[in-house]
Image (spheres, rainbow, N blue to C red):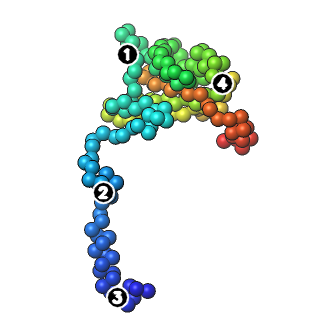
Amino acid sequence: MIFDKRPMAWIVVASLLASQGGCVTMSALMGQKRTATLDTHLLEAQGYSIPPGGMPSPVAPDPSGKPRVVLEVRVGERHLESIPLPLDRGMFIEELVQQAQLHDRFGNLNISIMRPNGAGKPPVRLEAAIDDKGKAKSVGQNYALQPGDHIIVVNDNRSSLERFIDKTFDR
């Protein structure tokens, strides 16, 4: 091997490795300056809405201060609605889907619940898959809704074959 015969090769390799302590980005190689903002164009193209600060707040809070959640339906065009939470009991994602009859109108649904996680922290994302009967495909995905939750509903665009395979192999 080359390192057995030439001890100087070890010194060259060690000095090269020691000088590369940081990560070099393509923008640095191309001479572009770094910006403080994150480029979210790809995420937005995939259907995510990420405003400055991380947590969407497209609907004004209720002036009475009663607990509410924001329902955002992204099937066809985007629809936003502020929904009050009951004060005497808990409300779950299945109940919201069935009351709004989303499963009747759109069939299988993929739901993301963006839950606030404190000031300055990104929201926690909870995923739920709802079948065409309005039931969560997994009992553990029937999340209880909390005030301030932002619920994003999208249509499950998988083909019948993909759904059959997932159902058969219980994924």
Q: Where does label 4 land, which residue?
A: 107
Q: Secondary structure at mark 2?
A: helix
Distance between the Cα atoms at labels 3 and 1?
71 Å
Q: Residue at x 60, y 23 (%)?
A: 94
Q: Quadrant of the N terminus?
A: bottom left
* Residue type of the residue flagged with mark 4: Gly
Front position in the image: 118 or 12: 12
Front position in the image: 142 or 43: 43
Distance between the Cα atoms at labels 4 and 2?
48 Å
* Residue type of the residue flagged with mark 1: Ala
The numbered mark, 4 or 2, whose residue comes first in the sequence reads: 2
Q: Residue at x 60, y 19 (%)?
A: 102
**Labels 3, 1: front one:** 3
* Residue type of the residue flagged with mark 3: Arg
**In the figure, 83 relative to 28: above or below?**
above
Mark identifier at residue 6: 3
Distance between the Cα atoms at labels 3 and 2?
32 Å
